[in-house]
Amino acid sequence: MRIVRVRHASLALLAICAAHAARADQPLAGAALDRTVSGRRIFLETPLGGEFPLNYYADGRIDGQGEAAGFGRFVRPNDSGRWWVSGEKLCQKWTKWYDGKVFCFTLQKVSQDRLAWRRDDGLEGLARIGR
C-alpha cells in the first residue's frame, strides 16, 4: 500500500513539473507579455558583442539609444517609436529605423531575466530584462 502511495505522489509531482515546464516553453502573451516589457529596459545582445538597450515605457513609447557596447559605441544610433501587445506578439514601429515598418515579435522567457525573441521575418536572438 505504501509503495502505491509513493508512486502516486511521484506521478503527481512529475505531472506538476511537466505542466510548469510546458508553460515556460510557451511564448509570453497578453497581460504577461505587457508586464514583462512595460516600464522596462530590454538589452538586446548584439552580433559584435555587448548589448543594445531599448526602453519600453508604460505609455506605449519606445526608444533606443546607441550607448551600447560594440558598434553603437561609435555611431550612436537612436530612434523612438511606439510599442503594443497584440495577442502573443510584441509589436513596434520606429520613426526612422526600418523605414517605419511595423515588426512584431514572440518572446519566451528562458530564465528570470533572459528572453528569447523571434521576429516575424525569422530573425531571432536573446535579450536581458533590465529595470
Image: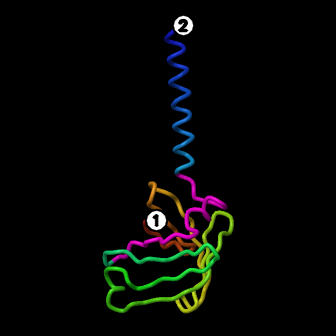
Query: If the image is split into quadrants, where does the N terminus sit?
Result: top right
Within the magenta stretch, is there residue 121?
A: no
Distance between mark 2 and mark 1 Cα atoms: 49 Å
Of callouts 2 and 1, which one flags the residue occurring earlier in the amino acid sequence?
2
User: What amino acid does circle 1 point to?
Assistant: Ile
Q: Amino acid at mark 2?
A: Met
SS of the residue under disc 2: loop
- Circle 2 residue: 1
Characterize the local packing of mark 2: few (<14), some (14-19) or many (20 or more) Cα atoms within 10 angstroms. few
Answer with left or right where residue 27 lies relative to residue 71: right
**Vertical relation: 124 (above or below) 14:** below
Q: Nearer the viewer, residue 69 or 11?
A: 69
Outermost residue to the top? 1
Q: Where is mark 1, residue-wise?
A: 129
Q: Which residues are magenta?
A: 25-47
- Is label 1 in a helix, a strand or a loop? strand
